[in-house]
Amino acid sequence: MSDKKTITFALMDPPYENARCTTALRLINIAAQRGYDVNVFAYEGAVGLPFTKQSPHPNAVHGHDVDEEDHPLPHEWIDAIAKLANANGGKLDWINCGLCVDERGVHEALDFVRRGSPADLWKWAEASDNTLVIPTK
Amino acid sequence: MASYLLIESRDPFESNDVTSVYELATGLIQEGNEVTVFLVQNGVLPARRSAKSQPLTGLADIGVEVLADDFSLRERGIKPERLADGIGASALDTVIDHLANGSKVIWH
Amino acid sequence: MGLKVLSIVESAYRATIEEQDDTILWTSTALKGAGADVDVLLRGNAVNYGVKGQDASGLQFGAKKQTQPPQLEDDLQRLIDLGAKVYVTTDDVAERGLERTDLIGGLEPISRSSIAKLCADYDQIWHW
């Protein structure tokens, strides 16, 4: 079993626009599987990741109804990762940049998500074993 | 000296600026650091042997560890036998290993 | 010794009109104001942020005027005034047809080939 670590991620991309969100969640999932404490500072479009008003849809081109299509909703993936972290002795902590939430109107988020600012990112960075910024383009 | 992990998510077919990562990797290894370049997403496209693979093989030749995310390779149908010289497939766990071990990790 | 971070800004003019600033220069300023030991490296197209005389004013959508356009050179100056080192990559400046005199004062020139050495001065490098 690995020693417990604390890793902070800063994310910028909104869901459904590029591959970076998926890779970020893959990384966070690995850390959760190891029982690490994971902090996520969501900046800009990334504040849309834990937005609970995402909803699934059918896919006529695939010939799937809504259940068959089982369309991914990032907030569900994040919720599952949080449960995985807890089950393995770790924790997922998530702060959305408050100003970014306001301008995008994505106020409804998973219940463990809270508002914050860059000062929170710095506090986490200082207290973590390491920090990875995943930039947008 | 330090350990660096440079994550390259962009590819040279679409982005001129991947050369900046190759240059940085070269500079860092010349400074005596341990350097790994980890290709992910479309960043694995030059891992399939082509004219664009040469800079990556060149990095491996000077001691940079060049790895490609196995999921990104599989997602793009890049089979192991088609990988350019000096490039190895790796699980994404490598990134978490580096973060946990205190490497300086830079995502491009 | 506390955490020392180099923030690399490469992407430029990405949503700067809607945000009325560059969000990474903004974050770096906020971090600096909160006491963080953070410096900035401008590379790629972001070296253009140092150009004097940028003017994004005058946009109007229907009757709605933008009253606070971004003022990126001022934002950079603010960061310098707060004590951040702001490096600018000289190769990228030259490639874009810029002379040193086109840029605001206070920027620290650095060649691309020196960036590897610069990284040794920082605990973490955040590439935005």
Image (cartoon, coloured by chain):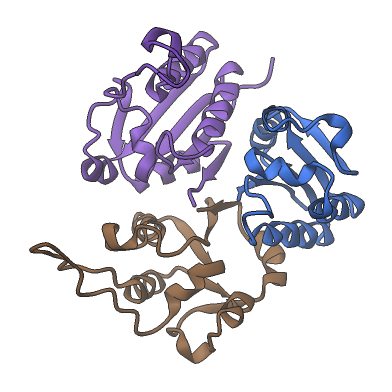
The answer, for residue A129, to whether it is visible in the render is yes
Among the chains pictured, the one given brown colouring is C
Quadrant for the N terminus of chain A in the image: top right
Q: Residue at 48% x, 18% y: name it.
A: A62
Determine whether, in the image, residue A95 is placed left or right of residue B43: left
Where residue A63 sits, quadrant-wise, is: top left
Q: What percent of the width, then of the height, locates residue A45? A: 36, 42
> Which residue is at the far bottom?
C101
Among the chains pictured, the one given purple colouring is A
Q: What percent of the width, then of the height, locates residue B32? A: 83, 57
The answer, for residue C43, to whether it is visible in the render is no
Q: What percent of the width, then of the height, locates residue A65? A: 39, 10
Q: How many labels, in total?
A: 0
Location of residue B84 with respect to B91 vertically, above or below? below
Chain B drawn colour = blue
Determine whether, in the image, residue A62 is placed left or right of residue C30: right
Location of residue A22 with respect to B53 vertically, above or below? above
Q: What percent of the width, then of the height, locates residue C97? A: 55, 85
Determine whether, in the image, residue A54 is placed left or right of residue B18: left
In this view, the residue in front, A89 or B86, is B86
Determine whether, in the image, residue B105 is placed left or right of residue A49: right
Q: Residue at 65% x, 62% y: name it.
A: B16
Location of residue C119 with respect to A28 vertically, above or below? below
Location of residue A89 with respect to C13 vertically, above or below? above
In this view, the residue in front, A133 or A124, is A133
> Which residue is at the far left?
C63
